[in-house]
Image (cartoon, rainbow, N blue to C red):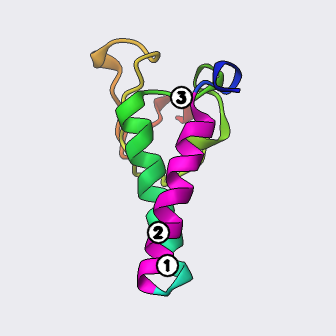
Amino acid sequence: LEDHFGGSQRATVLALAAGTATAMATGHSNAGLSAWYPSMYLHKEAWGRLGFYGYDLQDQCGATNVFSLGSDEGCIGECRGANYPNYAMN
């Protein structure tokens, strides 16, 4: 599965472990859910893109103000943050 999904399974299992441990330690399910998302973000930033050449669900979903540069997205000059204006819409 790791060859096919490229790391999305690994990221999900690590996020599940972080969320479950946090929920059990605090006794609150919302705290566990809050630990799930940072774990996914940290894994994505540490390992680049997760799977399917960068087109899987974990890469496409998330907060709109997260800034990241994927290794498969070109030069450093193409960095864009959350406030980058979309000139194509003008």
Q: Position of residue 49 (x, y in %)?
A: 50, 27
Indicate the quadrant where residue 47 lies.
Answer: top left
Q: Residues within 10 Å of mark 1 (few under 14, many from 20)?
A: few
Check whether the beta carbons of the residues at disc 2 and disc 1 lie within 8 A of each other.
yes
- Front in this rendered view, residue 10 or 40: 10
Q: Position of residue 54 (x, y in %)?
A: 58, 25
Please, what is the three-letter code of the amino acid marked with disc 1? Met
Q: Which residues are magenta?
A: 7-26
- Is residue 43 shown to the viewer in this render? yes
User: Which residue corresponds to mark 3?
Assistant: 88
35 vs 26: above or below: above
Please, what is the three-letter code of the amino acid marked with disc 3? Ala
Q: Position of residue 67 (x, y in %)?
A: 36, 41
Q: Nearer the viewer, mark 3 or mark 2?
A: 2
Check the picture and name the quadrant holding the N terminus: top right
Q: Is disc 2 placed on a helix, strand or loop?
A: helix
Q: Nearer the viewer, mark 3 or mark 1?
A: 1
- Residue at (50% x, 85% y) in the render: 28
Please, what is the three-letter code of the amino acid marked with disc 2? Ala
- Residue at (42% x, 41% y) in the render: 43
User: Which residue corresponds to mark 1?
Assistant: 24
- Residue at (40% x, 51% y) in the render: 65
Name the magenta segment's main secondary structure.
helix
**What separation in Å lies between label 3 and label 2 (alpha carbons)?**
45 Å
User: Which residue corresponds to mark 2?
Assistant: 21
